[in-house]
Amino acid sequence: MNRIGIVYYSRSGTGRAAAERLAEISHWPVYEIRDRHPRTGLGGDMRCMMDALARRSPDIQYEGPSLGGFDHVVLITPVWLRSVAAPMRTFLQRHGSEIASYSVACVLSGYGGLRAVDDIATIIGAKPRFILLLKQYDVIAEESDDALYKLTEQLKAGTAFDEAPAEISTIG
Ligand SMILES: Cc1cc2nc3c(=O)[nH]c(=O)nc-3n(C[C@H](O)[C@H](O)[C@H](O)COP(=O)(O)O)c2cc1C
């Protein structure tokens, strides 16, 4: 299990902080999904909510490589209204079929992480190997390292990879 990449979306920086820390720990390459139309201010807040409620797939920019070049992809996304953040939905609709195997780290303030993971599994058509639910406060306080180290170790070891059920790890 040596070709592993990290792909993240982050509107306000939490997912980015988690992705960059995981990249530091693991030395895996990291790629960002960006909004085509920035979500700043109150208008941006409203658009996040409308996209989540209507399950829209807003336009995005992704300049990373094809996911087909990886054995495993770690997806990092915020939770919006107990769903996957809409830009990650767009990304997976476009590129999910290239994914051989994946894990998910959701960043969130409270609840809905597993429903967001369900959204992702439905789009990709396969379950994740590992799931992390990372509370925003812990990511910002740099207290998510234990979970990120554990994920790195498990993926590097690749133990019983094909048979392993998803493992849920939460912080806080
Ligand atoms: C429109 C919107 C809806 C949200 N809904 C949820 C939610 O259902 N559950 C939750 O725990 N956090 C929710 N959050 C909080 C975000 O998931 C959390 O702040 C996350 O860390 C943001 O990640 P980011 O900084 O990478 O954008 C929501 C945030 C926004 C903007």
Image (cartoon, helix red, strand yellow):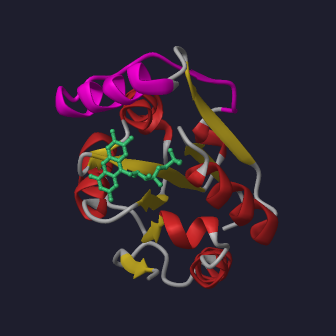
Front one among 86 and 3: 86
> Residue 128 appears at what percent x and percent y?
39, 62
Taking the image as shown, residue 130 lies to the left or right of residue 81, namely: right
Q: Is residue 167 above or below residue 65?
A: below
Q: Is residue 148 left or right of residue 2?
A: left
For the point 25% across and 60% down, the residue is 112
Of the pair 130 and 105, the residue shown nearer to us: 105
> Can I make out residue 4 in this image?
no
Q: Residue at x 73, y 64 (%)?
A: 21
Q: Residue furthest left?
A: 54
Question: Considering only vertical position in the picture, is 100 above or below 56?
Answer: below
Residue shown at the point (26%, 34%) measured from the top left: 52
Q: In the rendered structure, which segment of residues is drawn in magenta?
A: 41-65
> Hey, which quadrant is residue 54 in on the image?
top left
Q: Can see residue 144?
A: yes
Report if residue 43 lies within the magenta region. yes
Q: Which residue is more in the foreground, 132 or 66?
A: 132
Pick whichever, 98 or 56, lies toward us.
56
Q: Is residue 80 magenta?
A: no
Determine which quarter of the picture holds residue 132: bottom left
**Is 145 drawn above or below residue 49 in the view shown?**
below
Q: In the rendering, at what x and y percent does residue 80 appear?
A: 32, 44
* Up/down of 2 relative to 79, above or below: below
Q: Dividing the image into 4 quarters, which one contains the C terminus?
A: bottom left
